Amino acid sequence: MKIYAHRGYSGCYPENTMLAYRQAVTAGCDGIELDVQLAKDGTVVIYHDEKVERTTDGVGNIRDYTYDELRKFDAAKQWNGKFKKEEIPSFEEYCEWASSLPIETNIELKTGLVYYPEIEQKTIDLIVKYGLEKKVMFSSFNHCSLRKAKEIAPSIPCGALVGERGLVYAGYYCAQNGFEFYHPSYKTLDDASVKELADKGVGINAWTIDGMAELEKLTAWKVAGVITDYPSVCRLYLSGLKE
């Protein structure tokens, strides 16, 4: 079972910053989960919300700022001075950093509310530039965006993200659409749904695993991966099982 750090080590560090990614690697994660959008100038940037207010000292939409303008915001603002200023990273900055590391990256295409023109192509171009084709997967709540990514780069795995209500017969759905993975809330899984996915050959990467009870249950189900705010806790637990 692989451990994906949700927006980096977001439980203890400013989410979707290079600091959070570095700390996640130090904590022993197998991969990083992050979110990509497009700035006004077409730069692929890493940020979760469509607006910048929640985690920065800025106001407004990601799409209304150039990357240079976005870099001026402090992405560590919500930590009330605990950390020095952190910039919103570009996806290229992340790719350059990750290219020399033995980690995977789960790239969420944030196209559910804003369908950024050519975001799939722009993101894949950077993946290819840094030789990361075999170290990444895509996920998205917008499954049309996943199909577009598949059309451009068929060999890159895709995971169908779904909301809190889940999806009945998710294995059948993913297999029909060529998606290798299903990315549900752990709350929507049960023995029957896990079996149906396994029977269709679809892997499960469940979110967001921050408690021991759900971690134990998902380990017993032998899911492909867990997405967590606290990668060090998951690593310690899995390491203990091997002893």
Image (cartoon, rainbow, N blue to C red):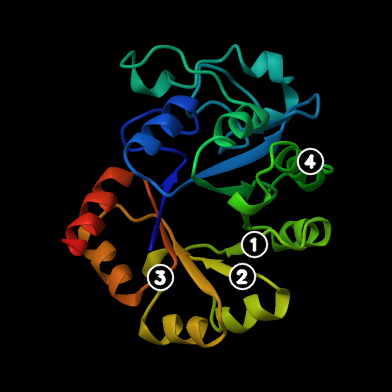
Residue 127, disc: none
| Mark 3 vs mark 4, CA separation in Å | 30 Å
Amino acid type of the residue that numbered disc 1 sits on in the rendered structure: Cys
Image-quadrant location for residue 213: bottom left
Query: Which of these two is toward me, 165 or 228?
Result: 228
Please determine whether, in this image, residue 218 is positioned above or below residue 118. below
Q: Residue at x 31, y 32 (%)?
A: 12
Q: Residue at x 41, y 72 (%)?
A: 188
Give the x, y percent position of residue 121: 81, 45
Residue 236 in view here:
yes
- Return the disc, 4 or 2, that comes first in the chain's sequence: 4
Q: Which residue is mark 2?
A: 180
Q: Which residue is mark 3?
A: 223
Give the x, y percent position of residue 65: 72, 21
Label 4 packing within 10 angstroms: few (<14), some (14-19), many (20+)? some
| Mark 2 touches mark 1? (CB < 8 Å) | yes
| Mark 2 vs mark 3, CA separation in Å | 13 Å
**Circle 3 sits in a helix, a strand or a loop, which is it?**
loop
| Mark 2 vs mark 1, CA separation in Å | 6 Å
In the visual, does 105 lie left or right of 43? left
Q: Residue at x 60, y 11 (%)?
A: 72
| Mark 3 touches mark 4? (CB < 8 Å) | no
- Return the disc, 3 or 1, that comes first in the chain's sequence: 1
Q: Which residue is mark 1?
A: 158
Amino acid type of the residue that numbered disc 3 sits on in the rendered structure: Val
Figure disc tally: 4
Give the x, y percent position of residue 91: 65, 33
